Image (tube, rainbow, N blue to C red):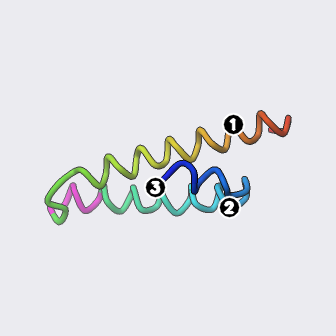
Amino acid sequence: MIAEEIRKKTVKELMTLLDETSLEHFKLKMQLTTGQLPTHNKVREARKNIALIKTIINEKRLADGTK
């Protein structure tokens, strides 16, 4: 994901995206554990996307002054 695209979304949309990405990360971890996923690159990418989304949510909340 590109940070510019994520920054254009609202906090509500970001929370939904975070839930979807977290679920995707969980599924990828299960596939890796069972041997269905040949490489771990997608798991790493999903984890980085989760961190990026959380960071942007925090930035938006601090800018708005809300928790």
Q: State the count of labels.
A: 3
Residue position marked by numbered label 2 in the rendering = 13
Residue position marked by numbered label 3 in the rendering = 1
* Amino acid type, residue under disc 1 in the picture: Glu
Q: Quadrant of residue 30?
A: bottom left
In magenta segment, residue 65: no
Q: Main secondary structure of the magenta part?
A: helix
Q: Residues within 10 Å of mark 3 (few under 14, many from 20)?
A: few
Which of the pair 21/23 is nearer the observer?
Answer: 21
Residue position marked by numbered label 1 in the rendering = 59
Task: Give the residue drawn at x 72%, y 53%.
Answer: 11
Residue 33 is situated, as x and y percent measured from the top left of the image, at 21, 55
Question: What secondary structure is found at the residue carrying circle 2?
Answer: helix
Evaluate if marks 2 and 3 touch, with contact meaning CB atoms under 8 Å apart.
no
Residue 10 is situated, as x and y percent measured from the top left of the image, at 73, 56
Q: Nearer the viewer, mark 2 or mark 3?
A: 3
Direction from residue 33 to residue 27 in the image, left or right: right
* Amino acid type, residue under disc 3 in the picture: Met
Direction from residue 67 to residue 22 in the image, left or right: left
Question: What secondary structure is found at the residue carrying circle 1?
Answer: helix
* Amino acid type, residue under disc 2 in the picture: Glu
Image: magenta residue range: 30-35
Separation of residues labelled 1 and 3 (CA atoms): 17 Å
Q: Which mark is residue 19?
A: none
Which of the pair 46/6 is nearer the observer?
Answer: 6
Residue 55 is situated, as x and y percent measured from the top left of the image, at 59, 38
Question: What secondary structure is found at the residue carrying circle 3?
Answer: loop
Residue 64 is situated, as x and y percent measured from the top left of the image, at 84, 39
